[in-house]
Structure formats: C-alpha cells, structure tokens
Amino acid sequence: MFDRLRAFHRPATVAAALRLATAERRAGGRGAFVAGGTDLVVQGDGSLRWVVDLSLLPLRYVRRRGAGGGWTIGSTTTMADLERSAALRRFADGVLCDAAATAGSPQIRNRGTIGGNLANASPACDLAPPLLALDASAVIAGGAAGARKAAGGRRTVALERFFRGPGRPALNGGLLVEIVIPAPPVPRGGRAAWAFQKLGRLQSDIAVVNAAAGVIVGSDCRCRWARIAIGAAGPTPLRARRAEALLVGRPFDRDAAQAAAARAAGETRPVSDVRATADYRREMSRVLVGRALDECLERMGRDPWASW
Ligand SMILES: Cc1cc2nc3c(=O)[nH]c(=O)nc-3n(C[C@H](O)[C@H](O)[C@H](O)COP(=O)(O)OP(=O)(O)OC[C@H]3O[C@@H](n4cnc5c(N)ncnc54)[C@H](O)[C@@H]3O)c2cc1C
C-alpha cells in the first residue's frame, strides 16, 4: 500500500517533527504526519514518500487552563482518553466525552486522536460539533509563512475557521499542537447545558448527521448564549448562527428549541451520497438539533414538553 515510502520518522519533540517535515518537503515528494493512522492508513495514499509519526510527542494530555475554567487538550490525546476522562466528564455535561464515545469501535478510539479527527477535516467528524459548541480553537505550530512570524512560531485559529472544505484543514503544512476551550460565560445565578446527538447506520459508523448544542440562560431563564453545531450537513462542520440568534434573548423553552431546530436545518448545505440523501440529512439535522436542545432543557431541570 505504501510502496513508495522511503522515510519513517519518529521524533520526540514538536520542534524536531517540524524540522523533519520541512527537510523532507525540501527534498521533494509527498508526505504526511501520522498520529493514530486510522484515517491515513485507510486512505492508503500510495504516493506518500515520507511520514512523521507523532506518537512520541508529549501532546497526550487533558489540562485545565489556570483557575478560569477552560481546558487545553493535546493533539495526540486519543478518543478513548477523552471518553474516559473523569475531569472532562464533569465539564459541559461531558459533551466531548459523549461525542468521543460514539466514534467507531473501542479499537478505533484507542488509536484515533483528537488531532487526527480534526486535521482529517471530514465534514462528519464527531469531535467538531461539540468543540464548535464550546468555542474551541486550534493551536498550530509551523507550516504557513505567517506562523513563523507569530510568537513561538504558533498561531491560534478558531475552530470554525479551521475547516475550509472536505479534507482541507487550515494547517498549511503545520502541526496541530493542541485544542483550547475557553471557560463558558455562565453568569451568576445562570445555568448552562450541552448535548451531543449522532445518527449513523450502526453505532460504529461515520455519522449521517451529528449535532451539538450548548445553551446558557440567566437567572431570568432567558437565553444569554447559544451554540448549535452540525456535522455531515455541508462541506464542513458548521455553526447554525441564525438558529442561535433565534434563541438568544428569549425564554428558553420547547417552542424556542423547536423553532431554532427548524431554522438550523435551513442553514445546512448537505449533499447526497452513499450514506443518505441531502433531503434526509436536512430533515435529520432538524431532528437532532431539536433533540440536543431538548436534552439541554432536561439538563437544566426543565421538562422539555412544558413551558417555563
Ligand atoms: C472503522 C473506522 C470507523 C471510524 N468511525 C469514526 C466515527 O464514528 N467518527 C469519527 O469522527 N471518525 C471515525 N473514524 C475516523 C478516524 O478514526 C478518526 O477521524 C480519528 O480521530 C483520526 O485520528 P488518527 O489519529 O487516527 O488520525 P491519522 O489517521 O493519524 O491522521 C489523519 C489525518 O490528520 C493528519 N494529522 C494527524 N494528526 C495531526 C496533527 N497533530 N497535526 C497535523 N496533522 C495531523 C494526518 O496527516 C492525516 O492527514 C473511523 C475510522 C475507521 C477506520
């Protein structure tokens, strides 16, 4: 499969990984970083001449960011690490753990990393919707010309701008170092909830559609902040901003949730493929966003079928 491969590097630092990739690119020939290999190996690109394996880099961690309540997650942290993280489970209703737990089989989750999931830039990747609903950013080292000028050769890209199209991450040859999640802006006396939903043919399948929602209400029960993110319903995982705007400022109840879900479906740009038709994906976007928002209502201690 990788018959043309002539070099396999296994550096122990980010700097060494970038140096090796730069040297290989100068020498000519296509190459790639590899983390868990669950996408790269399956894609089986026989034209690869070199690979830089990231598995020895010290990037496998889930850490709190100071006292502020945010998080940083190293790019080689596996799906299984996320699924099992007791600390992350207590953050944002464990929305990231729930999404990680739906990705493939245990074997895939033991190898597949958060960095590979995002860098592969599949519109259907399961970690993008919850991370978009958490306002996450990607920290990238090396690659683009601009990066060398940035402090320490690193730049931070909001996840929404990270996805440029199917298989097109905003890496420009750089290395995804970590994911940064800020502290959610929950006001005093307010409440917050998050939820993830996925529809796949079987549990281990790639999503036909996936969605995540996050809602913060003030002590007056009006929505202060809303995030709705949908995957596999456009060329990139997307934020349904018009649906979010519909929620903000209104009492957060089931009517508002269903109206937002309908509007979110209107913001999708799905395609028809082997997994589903575009129409089915659009309709399932409405259903999954509605379920995610219902779950947020339940988590806030409200019956989704009753008004506040
Ligand atoms: C049977 C099967 C089932 C699957 N099911 C799901 C599923 O349900 N949901 C889902 O979301 N995914 C699924 N996947 C896809 C895959 O497992 C995930 O996307 C996984 O997280 C990829 O991570 P990896 O570390 O294996 O990436 P790799 O295969 O190592 O890399 C993927 C791509 O990202 C690049 N890359 C990796 N790390 C970095 C980095 N730090 N910086 C820059 N570039 C990098 C590589 O060069 C490559 O282009 C499935 C895959 C298989 C084979």
Image (tube, grey):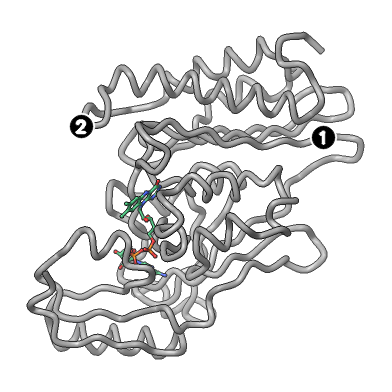
The residue carrying pointer 1 sits among few (fewer than 14), some (14 to 19) or many (20 or more) residues within 10 Å by Cα, namely: some
Left/right of residue 47 with respect to residue 11 in the rendered view: left
Residue drawn at point x = 30 percent, y = 39 percent? 235
Q: CA distance from mark 1 to mark 2?
A: 41 Å
Establish whether ligand 1 lies closer than 8 Å to the Cβ of label 1: no
Q: Residue flagged by tag 2: what amino acid is it?
A: Val
Which residue matches tag 2?
274
Left/right of residue 93 with respect to residue 288 in the rendered view: right
The quadrant of the picture occupied by the C terminus is top right
Please tell me whether mark 2 sits on a helix, a strand or a loop: loop
The answer to whether 300 is drawn above or below residue 87 in the figure is: above
Please name whichever residue, 24 or 224, is drawn nearer the observer in this view of the structure.
24
Residue drawn at point x = 58 percent, y = 44 percent? 98
Q: Ligand 1 lies in which image quarter?
A: bottom left
Please name whichever residue, 156 or 149, is drawn nearer the observer in this view of the structure.
156
Residue drawn at point x = 47 percent, y = 82 percent? 57
The residue carrying pointer 2 sits among few (fewer than 14), some (14 to 19) or many (20 or more) residues within 10 Å by Cα, namely: few
Is label 1 in contact with label 2 (beta carbons under 8 Å)? no
Q: Which mark is residue 285?
A: none
Q: Which mark is residue 191?
A: 1
How far across and how far down the image is residue 190, in percent?
Answer: 85, 34
Give the mark, 1 or 2, whose residue is nearer the N terminus. Answer: 1
Please tell me whether mark 1 sits on a helix, a strand or a loop: strand
Q: Residue flagged by tag 1: what amino acid is it?
A: Arg
Please name whichever residue, 135 or 131, is drawn nearer the observer in this view of the structure.
131
